[in-house]
Amino acid sequence: MRASDYLFTDSWVIPAPRDAVCEVLLDLEHYVDWWPQVRAVASVGPDDALVVCRSRLPYDLELHLHAETRGPDELRVAIDGPIRGFASWRLTPVAGGTRLDFEQRVEAVARLFRWASYVAKPVLAANHAWMMRGAEQGLEARLSRARR
């Protein structure tokens, strides 16, 4: 793996049925309502969106996402922008809710991100981990509000 390549994985169990979790994850335009690090989403077609993310580091990451898979068991998007690759969610019904397995494989392609990959990769990985904690907490809170 090159310094500019990243693999991120996370797994959680959310206390909600798979279909409810899938419904929230498919509704990309409303991620800003529950995922604090997603700052803006603009639909640019039936399968495409522009997304602005910002975690702890002081920069906005502007990404173009293209939906590749939208099933109840897996959601997958191609990612383009300063990073390129894909992100996917796998959803599995389990006792007490839904297990989510997140995988993101990307390459830093923008000059700044490629350079940062050589000197600050652990910091960038920690920034991503912070963003994913926000996703887990926000998704769980969003789904608990829906159950009330």
Image: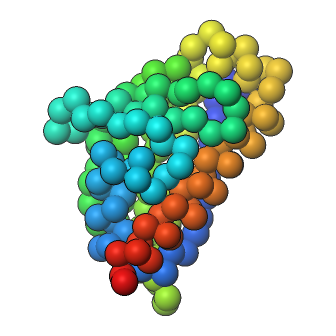
The residue under the point 72% across, 14% down is 115
Q: Quadrant of residue 112?
A: top right
Q: In which quarter of the image is residue 142?
A: bottom left
**Is residue 67 left or right of 76 when viewed as pictured?**
left
Q: Is residue 2 visible?
A: no
Q: Is residue 96 visible?
A: yes
**Is residue 26 left or right of 125 when viewed as pictured?**
left
The residue under the point 57% across, 14% down is 110
Q: In the image shown, does 58 or 129 lie closer to the viewer?
A: 58
Location of residue 93 in the rendering, given as x and y in whole percent from the top left corner: 41, 80
Count numbered badges in the picture. 0
Residue pushed farthest left?
Answer: 46
Q: Is residue 71 above or below residue 130?
A: below
Location of residue 65 in the rendering, given as x and y in whole percent from the top left corner: 36, 34
Location of residue 61 in the rendering, given as x and y in whole percent from the top left corner: 53, 27
Q: In the image shown, does 57 or 114 lie closer to the viewer?
A: 57
Q: Which colour scheme is used?
A: rainbow
Q: In the image shown, does 68 or 113 lie closer to the viewer?
A: 113
